[in-house]
Amino acid sequence: MVEGMHQDRHFFGEQASTAYYRPHPAGPAGPGQVISRIDAPATATVVLGIPKALCSLLIVIPVAYVIAAVMGLALAAAGVRGAALEYVVNLLVVLLVLAWCASGALLGTKVGGNFLARRVLELRPAVGYEQARLQMAWYGLLHGVGEDPAKYSLWVEESTDINAHACSGGIVAVTRAALERVPAGHLQAILAHELAHHVRQHARASALLAYYGFPARILGKITQFFLRLTTAMFFCNPFLGLFMAALWFGCLFPIGLIMTVGTLFMAATAAFDRSTELAADRFAADLGYGPALMQVLQHWINEGHDQAYAAMSWWQRLTASHPPAHERIQHLYTHLQRRSQHW
Ligand SMILES: [Zn+2]
């Protein structure tokens, strides 16, 4: 869910939102009406992630070489020499790179999702009354749309913000504040939005992007470090600065260029992220939770979320993953109005 701007309804509009289930004008859809399927914004996220993943190889391959070289030293100490040693080291490099390429598949599993939820997102499984409250809302929602509860697990984030997340591996998490302060109907509306992130594969697409883009992010940090170092050196000692600049243009410029292009991709990916939010809102609205979701978003506005958004820099807005709440309300309103005209 989370807060968040802009969307291009011409790309991923009404047809996309109604193609995966039969909407019902009077309330939640009936059993068997939701079909899990990747939608256009999630597909775009995956496609835009490919160049970033290729940038990541610029880190993954050297790391694989280092690991293979260390293992090669151990093999040399054990008596392996010459062509046999070279063959084993090269094979190790290929296997390590292939293992990294294949490891993203783990993100879609419960084990991979749980690991990310605990270690990266700092979530914990819902217990006791949290589980009881969440299950009541979640199972009611899933029963209404014919989804299997066994595909999902319920988690909690310790936060005072009213929010929720859908994470790869079937994880649905809500904040403690949402659990304690949000009325049951509104909680179900928030969960309907998160369900959309799962059934339309938004959660899996973002997890893949984050995972395969992580080495590229490290590369970006290294590039930024060298840029700052070059600038600082130039002002301290022009000759040293010129040497660093030559090194930069000779060796690091191609990487810098790739990272610049990557930054542009970042803005495009964020735009698709915002589209997934609006698509998830429409999904929830089509299940009958539009008015409740609008009230939740209005609550965010009352809490100052949109004021914080307005205070962001142009770049922060361009790369924001969520539209501001007032735009989401407007989008929902327009969507519901169009829907009502069709019935
Ligand atoms: Zn969302």
Image (cartoon, rainbow, N blue to C red):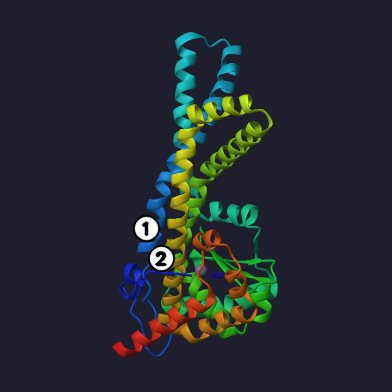
The percent position of residue 301, horizontal first and vertical second, equals 59, 79
Q: Nearer the viewer, residue 246 or 212?
A: 246
Q: Would you identify the image quadrant in which residue 40 lies? A: bottom left
**SS for callout 2:** loop
Would you say 154 lies left or right of 151 here?
right
Q: Residue under circle 1?
A: 43
Above or below, comparing residue 75 to residue 52 in the picture:
above
Q: Nearer the viewer, residue 60 or 166?
A: 60
C-alpha distance separating marks 1 and 2: 10 Å
The percent position of residue 334, horizontal first and vertical second, equals 40, 83
- Nearest to N terminus: mark 1 or mark 2: 1
Find residue 200 and name its label.
2
Would you say 90 lies left or right of 129 here?
left
Would you say 25 lies left or right of 231 here?
left
Residue 75 visible? The answer is yes
Residue 149 visible? The answer is no
Ligand 1 is within 8 Å of the C-beta of the residue at disc 1: no
Q: Report the residue at 39% width, 62% height from top.
A: 41
Q: Nearer the viewer, residue 115 or 46?
A: 46
Q: Report the residue at 37% width, 57% height from top.
A: 44
Above or below, comparing residue 296 to residue 105 in the picture:
below
Disc 1 to disc 2: CB gap under 8 Å: no
Q: Amino acid at mark 2?
A: Arg
Q: Amino acid at mark 1?
A: Thr
The percent position of residue 156, horizontal first and vertical second, equals 64, 67
The percent position of residue 147, horizontal first and vertical second, equals 44, 72
